[in-house]
Image (spheres, grey):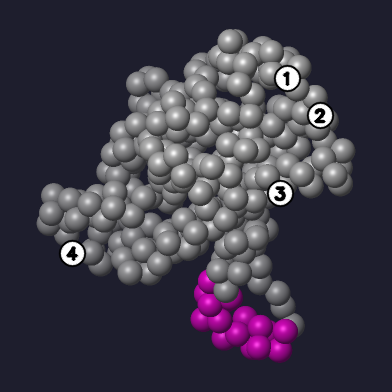
Amino acid sequence: MIYKTKSDWLNAPDKRIMLFGMSGLGKTHVSNMLRATGNWFHYSVDYRIGTRYMGEYISDNLKREAMRSPLLRDLLMTDSVQVKSNITFNDLSPLSTYLGKPGDPAKGGVPWDEYLRRQRQHRAAEQAAMRDTAQFAARAHDIYGYDNFVCDTSGSICEIVDPEDENDPVLSALSDSVLMIWIEGSEDHADELARRFDKAPKPMCYQNDFLQTAWSDYLTETNNAPEAVDPDAFVRWTYRRALAHRQPRYRAMADNWGLTLKADDMAGMTSESELVEVIGAALG
């Protein structure tokens, strides 16, 4: 770790951290709080994925849909209109919509092979966006004068690395530039996240072997053909499995590459000084 002791952390003129864990446990809340102080640069990995690395995929898909309309087709063919996404830090809907959910096209589902292709695109994009972290920390300092830097990761970071491999290329690069911090949730948090997800099931990026097994098991359990699967039903069914699948991977990342903070401690955090103190205590 770049800060090995509490003293190293508290006395560092520049503080660089990376927050990881399940979506909904406070990564973006804390990142926004730090950015609002004016002292921290906020690097959103999801935003980077949706703009730099998957922006063309998203725009092309929107154009493909628009071309189905005779009116829009004529305007697009003459460059009379533009079709593009408008991703922001707080609205990543175009990225989620592109990633999609597998199943019945009549219910908004994506054919399985196409779904797998988009999953591969996202995993490659996320790995690239994570490797950009050091570059953005340097740019934040050199261009904007920020000494402090927070990397707000996607919930799927544990799906694109091998935390048990001391030579993992993504984690090795990150360990040289940021202090990796897992925001650990409890069983109560898992229940609440599952309830939220049940109300509004969203596309997710999964590790390939996990995804293939989940799909096969779901088809067997429901006796559905792939093209007849209810997309929302599948991702709801998969979410609890994903929570259990990711927990040991997050833990290994924290044990081997960083440290752990509790989600309850992060949820009520209101100031930069509180965070600095909590991280110092964890290092101590």
Marks 2,4: beta carbons within 8 A: no
Question: Mark 3 = which residue?
Answer: 135
Residue type, mark 4 in image: Ala
Label 3 is placed on what type of residue?
Gln
- Label 2–label 1 contact, CB within 8 A: yes
Residue 73 is inside the magenta segment? yes
Residue shown at 38%/50% (left/top)? 206
Q: Nearer the viewer, residue 135 or 106?
A: 135
Question: Which mark is in front, 4 or 1?
Answer: 1
Give the CA separation, mark 2 to mark 4. Answer: 53 Å
Which mark lies nearer to you, 3 or 2?
3
Between discs 4 and 3, the one toward the N terminus? 3
Residue 46 visible within the image: no
Q: Name the residue under label 1.
A: 272
Circle 4 is placed at which residue position?
225
Give the residue at mark 2.
39
Amino acid type indicated by mark 1: Glu
Q: Distance between the residues labelled 2 and 1?
A: 9 Å
Left or right: where does residue 250 sit relative to residue 87? Answer: left
Q: Which of marks 4 and 1 is nearer the N terminus?
A: 4
Nearest to N terminus: mark 3 or mark 2: 2
Q: How crowded is mark 3: few (under 14 residues within 10 Å), some or many (20 or more)?
A: few
Total count of labels: 4
Tell me the distance, in whole angstroms, between the alpha carbons under discs 4 and 1. 52 Å
Whether residue 186 is in magenta: the answer is no
Q: In whole angstroms, how far apart are the C-alphas of marks 4 and 3?
A: 46 Å
Q: Give the range drawn in magenta.
A: 61-79
Q: In this view, does 135 lie above or below 184?
A: below
Q: Which of marks 2 and 1 is nearer the N terminus?
A: 2
Image x and y of residue 155, in percent = 48, 40
